[in-house]
Image (tube, coloured by chain):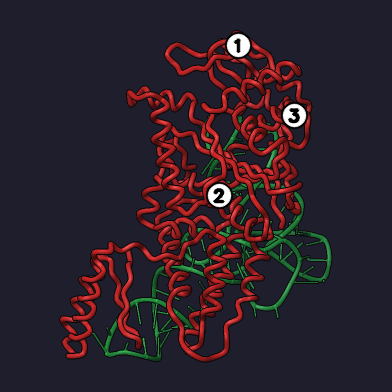
Amino acid sequence: MKLYNTLSGKKEDFAPADGPVKMYVCGVTPYDRSHLGHAMSYIIFDALRRYLEYRGHEVRHVQNYTDIDDRIIARANQLGIPPQELAEQLIAEYAAEMEALNVLPAHVYPRATEEIPTMIDMISTLIDKGYAYEAERDVYFRVSAKKDYGKLSGRSLEATEAGARCGVGREVEPGENKEHPGDFALWKAAKPGEPSWPSPWGPGRPGWHIECSAMSVKYLGETLDIHGGGVDLVFPHHENEIAQSEAYTGREPFVRFWLHNGWLYLDEEKMSKSLGNIIPISEGLEKYGADGCRLFVLNSHYRSPLTYSEEGLEAGKRAAERLRLAACLPGAGEGPPLDPEAFRRRFIEAMDDDLNTAQALAALFDLAREINRARDEGWPVEEGQAALRELAGVLGLTLAEEEVGLAARPFIDLLVELRDELREAKLYQLSDKVRSRLAELGVALEDTSEGTRWRRRG
RNA sequence: GGCGACGUAGCCAAGUGGUUAAGGCAGGGGUCUGCAAAACCCUGAUCGGCGGUUCGAAUCCGCCCGUCGCCUCCA
């Protein structure tokens, strides 16, 4: 399989270094509801993980929760609740939404607040090695000590230094005690009223970047096979992670494959909590279902930016229904069997090429058409359907029907039965009324030679 | 100012040197149906513009136009 590696800027052949695939995906900072942008990223890395497993790799997947940071504190103060309580609530909500989206859970979900000692150890070592320094109870990473700093994002230290917007040079802010403007905080001294942890440098809390380094080394080892996240994390977050981790372990590379997904846009702007233009995951799930959301995301390449639109998600939902019906409606008796092998091969070939899910989906839709065609001919379709379900499953599609309350089923069956009798009596006006009223309630009826069947339709 | 991405049918979106430019959604025509629905069949683009390289370019190069991102928190 080939994967595009941000570090080299090229597609490279992927194979794990040894043992299971060590995969780390940057998690959320739970200070507000998660939105479709997050869903996009996690759906993509879920598809990657499922595909790796499908191809016979064991995957060890770690994802962090940044459960302490400025925004959590600010938001918690606003709400008048402790920061930990806010984080706890939002983590629970996030986990439930991921489950609803059929995203496989990571094997470990370390939290920043539970890894403080690990981070303190790492920071101490960095100081000992001359890669970090203490300044007024803060600790900073000394960027100039890591000569290849900038290798991931492709910017030189000088460029970073001069690199503020509009040509204005970036300088050390007054009040900061950095040696260099590019230096970043490993440990932040506590301000009054903030949650803090004891450390050799006094009470404080860890900087953002150090947690991922500490956690990934602790749970996956010194070299990761895959590290994923949104493109926005390339700089400075992932750049800093590389610097810290490699300085700490003395080993390169910290990560063999850096993978970054494109951003989700709303209208002309990126969807982002700080801009406030978000569509919550819950809304996407409610309106379009997990499969609809997944198809919307996976229908384009993961590295390309994607623009949110109701039309796009609606198309995803309709497409999901198309696949579901192809996979579920029964076929009939005798005839030439459907050989799905060519479709499976196309699917694998597409996924092998840097996770080309759009092309993989095209193979699934072609398979669906082949199944429908066979069904129309009265030929058996089971083999094709099994393959369709198998491959859709690799993309995390459930192909499950929308839930109908158990209590409603017998009543719907009864109405369908009555309507059939009305039709037999050729009382079409009445039978059509039953059908259209049920349609308004979200139940679609279809008359077939096998009888009438009904299904949920939003 | 530095670095980078993108512009393919009504919409979304693959394809990145060579048979008829995938697929989805929407639309039109047809088959099936009491009528529908679902499904199937048919139906649409020469690839932002200009110039160049080449036997041959959506695909490579140059210029132009347009949109956007990163350089600050962010999946």
SS for tag 3? helix
Residue that label 2 marks: A305
Determine the CA span between mark 1 and mark 2.
Answer: 42 Å
Residue that label 1 marks: A201
| Dot 2 amino acid type | Pro
For the colour green, the matching chain is: B
Q: Quadrant of residue A64?
A: top right
- Above-or-below relation of B63 to A214: below
Camera-nearest label, 3 or 2: 3
SS for tag 2? loop
Q: Is residue A225 left or right of residue A283?
A: right
Q: Quadrant of residue B2?
A: top right
Residue that label 3 marks: A249
Chain designation of label 3: A
SS for tag 1? loop
Q: Identify the mark nearer the N-term, 3 or 1.
A: 1
Location of the C terminus of chain A by quadrant is bottom left
Q: Identify the mark nearer the N-term, 1 or 2.
A: 1
Determine the CA span between mark 3 and mark 1.
Answer: 22 Å
Q: Identify the mark nearer the N-term, 3 or 2.
A: 3
